[in-house]
Image (cartoon, helix red, strand yellow):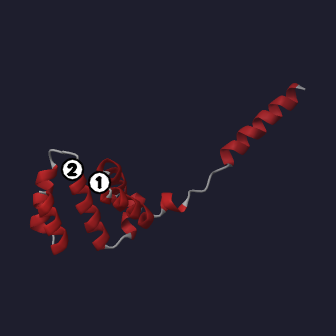
Amino acid sequence: MRLKKYTLLVFFSIASSIVHAQATKINNDPAEQFKTAKAYFQNNAFSLAYPVFKNLQQPENGATLMDATIKEQIKFYIIVCELQLKNTSAVNKAIEFVSLENNVALVQMMSFYL
C-alpha cells in the first residue's frame, strides 16, 4: 500500500514537470504586442503602454524581428510615455530624439510633447 502511494507521487511529480502550457499568440507575437501597446497609448493609458513598449525593445522579446521603422516608433512611444509619467530623464531623451532622428512626423510629434 505504501509503495503504491509513493509510485503515484513520483508519477504525478514527473507528469507535472513535463506538462507545459502553450503560449497564446498575443503573448509571443511582437506585432500584436505593439498594437496592444499603441492602443493603450492612444487611450492615454501611458502607465499600461510603457512596460509593453519597454518589453518590445528587448532583443529576446522580438526586437530583432522588427524593421527599423517600428523600432523608431517604439523608441518614440517609450520617450513620450516617460514624459507623460514625469520621468526626470525623459526631457533629455526627447531633445536627443528630436535632434538625431530623421522621421519628420515623429520629430514633430515629439516636439509637441516637449
For the residues labelled 1 and 2, say whether their Cβ atoms are less than 8 Å apart: yes
Specify the quadrant of the image occupied by residue 76. Answer: bottom left
| Position of 97 relative to 19 (above/below) | below
Residue sitting at 81 percent across and 35 percent down?
A: 8
Is 93 positioned to the left or the right of 15 in the image?
left
In the picture, measured across the screen, residue 70 lies left or right of residue 104, that is right
The C terminus sits in image quarter: bottom left
Residue located beneath label 1 in the image: 44
Residue 85 locus on image (x, y percent): 23, 46
- How packed mark 2 is, by other alpha carbons closer than 10 Å (few <14, some 14-19, many 20 or more), is some
Q: How many residues crowd around disc 1 within 10 Å: few (fewer than 14), some, or many (20 or more)?
A: few
Viewport quadrant of the N terminus:
top right
Q: Which of marks 1 and 2 is nearer the N terminus?
A: 1
Residue holding disc 2: 84
The secondary structure type at the circle numbered 1 is loop
Residue at the location (27% across, 66% down)? 73
